[in-house]
Structures are given as structure tokens and as C-alpha cells.
Amino acid sequence: MWIRRTGMGGILAALCLAAAGCGTTVPTGTNAGEFKKLPLTQFEGYVLTEGLDSPWNLVWGPDNWLWVSERAGKRITRVNPDTGEKKVVGTIDEAYPDTPHEGVLGFALSPELLKGGGNDSLYVYYIHRVDGQRQGRIARYMMPSGRRWAIRSS
């Protein structure tokens, strides 16, 4: 195989291409080093949805939808995994998405979310500005009673 001298990136790309033809390995157990061969043909891929503004974090929700943080879009969006339909849960206007590691980043869903116990909480990590300085913040948002999929600060 002929490889152009492009530095480490070119070598890594060539290795990835070579591995693509041979399958890949995945962990099979809890012990490091336990691997088995998994052919890439075991999975088929397709585009589920488009138009998300810099998706960052992805969580399977208790409603059987994918919940996605949109870093630059400053929002949390739900995506129906069967149809690709999108519904915005809420927008965090004070998030500051200036660089690739800013804006709405990670989030976690309360284990009791949508179970009728009243703790319908969403925890979001985002970057915002205070006196011109960028700061990280973890905020708790709760589903207001009588309103579905809207979020507000608590």
C-alpha cells in the first residue's frame, strides 16, 4: 500500500481505512483486554434527523426518545428514534456558545422523570458570562405542572 507522507494524521487515517476492511474489536467483558472481532457489516447506519445546531450530548429518555443538547443552539431537543421528529424541550438563553467547548454542553435526566412522582428534573451544564467572564454552571430545570416539555429555572 502506498502512503503519502502526511504525518501522524495520514498514518492514522490509513490504519483506520485498513481496519475498516477487516472489522474492528470491541470489549466483551469487564476485564481490560477482553476483545472479540466485530465486523462493521453487523451494523447498518442511516441519518435519523438533521438540522440540529452542534449536537453535543445524547441520552435515551424515559419517553423512549433521544434527548440531545445543542451546544450552539442553546437548547435541549427530543428526537423520535423511529421518525426523526424533533421537539424542543427548552432553550437556555443565557448560555454562551462562542467557542466549540461553550454553550449548552452536558445534561442529565432525573431517574424519576416522567414517572409521576413530581421530580421531573433536568440538570444542564452550560457556559454563560458573568461580568464579561465565561463561567460554567450546572442548573436544575423542572417541568412545570400542567405544562409539558417546557423548562424553567428552579
Image (cartoon, rainbow, N blue to C red):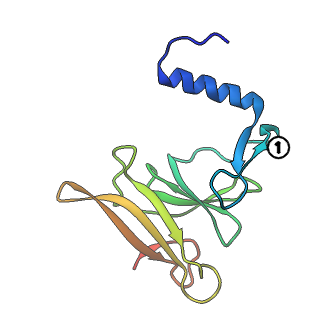
Where in the figure is residue 57, as x and y percent of width and height? 53, 56
**Quick one: which residue is furthest to the bottom in this view?**
117
- The N terminus lies in which quarter of the figure? top right
Q: Seen in the image, is 148 located left or right of residue 35?
A: left
Q: How many marks?
A: 1
- The C terminus lies in which quarter of the figure? bottom left
Where in the figure is residue 125, as x and y percent of width and height? 41, 63
Could you tell me which residue is drawn at 34 percent across and 57 percent down?
A: 127
Where in the figure is residue 46, as x and y percent of width and height? 74, 42
Residue 110 occupies quadrant:
bottom right
Q: Is residue 106 above or below residue 7?
A: below
Q: Is residue 101 above or below residue 117?
A: above
**Quick one: which residue is furthest to the right in this view?**
42
The residue type indicated by label 1 comes to Gln
Which element is circle 1 on? helix
Q: Is residue 41 above or below residue 49?
A: above
Residue 95 occupies quadrant:
bottom left
Q: Residues within 10 Å of mark 1 (few under 14, many from 20)?
A: few
The residue lying toward the viewer, choosing from 110 and 21, is 21
Q: Seen in the image, is 48 located left or right of residue 126?
A: right
Could you tell me which residue is drawn at 33 percent across and 45 percent down?
A: 98
**Does residue 47 show up?**
no
Q: Is residue 149 above or below residue 37?
A: below
Where in the figure is residue 135, as x and y percent of width and height? 27, 59
Q: Seen in the image, is 131 located left or right of residue 22?
A: left
Task: Look at mark 1 in the image and give the residue it sits on.
Answer: 42
The residue lying toward the viewer, choosing from 76 and 134, is 134
Residue 13 occupies quadrant:
top right
Could you tell me which residue is drawn at 38 percent across and 60 percent down?
A: 126
**Does residue 33 show up?**
yes
